[in-house]
Amino acid sequence: MKVDELMTTARDMVSVRRVYAEPIEKDGVTVIPTAKVAGGGGGGQGHDEKGQEGEGGGFGAGGRPVGAFTIKDGTVRWVPAVDVNRLIATVGAVVIAALFARVRVAKLRAKAAAGKP
């Protein structure tokens, strides 16, 4: 991909349309879904000892929902999205860390009780 094509693609991918979706209206409530979007890329050009030139690059982007704005009777409210998988992974990591810490503390207490340094 040429560098100017890469920049055009990157500009199109990281836009406000990717963060805020089209509003959805139903039964007097308007919902505007939102997402967290991140991206990165790089490119370059050069030539070899034979005088051949080349250029190229790449770009990647990702996103995840973070919540939605709801509008009802003129009142705007933020409703966060709950990522259950991330929540379970975080709780699991905390429990595992607590178990390791508990074992370590128990070993240190046993050594101290035995009078070992």
Image: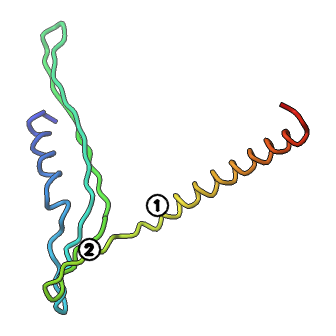
Q: Earlier in the sequence, mark 1 or mark 2?
A: 2
Name the side, left or right, on which 10 lies relative to 104: left
Of marks 1 and 2, the one in the foreground: 2
Residue 46: image x %, image y %? 16, 18
The disc labelled 2 sits on which kind of residue?
Trp
Name the side, left or right, on which 89 lies relative to 72: right
Which residue carries the number 2 mark?
Answer: 78
Residue 94: image x %, image y %? 58, 56
Residue at the far bottom in the pictured view: 27
Residue 3: image x %, image y %? 12, 33
Dividing the picture into quarters, in which one does residue 50 lie? top left
Q: Which mark is residue 86?
A: 1
Q: Residue at x 55, y 61 (%)?
A: 91
Dividing the picture into quarters, in which one does residue 95 lie? bottom right
Looking at the picture, tell me which residue is in the foreground, 79 or 107: 107
Residue at the far top in the pictured view: 49
Q: Residue at x 14, y 61 (%)?
A: 17
Residue 29: image x %, image y %? 19, 86
The disc labelled 1 sits on which kind of residue?
Arg
Q: Which mark is residue 14?
A: none
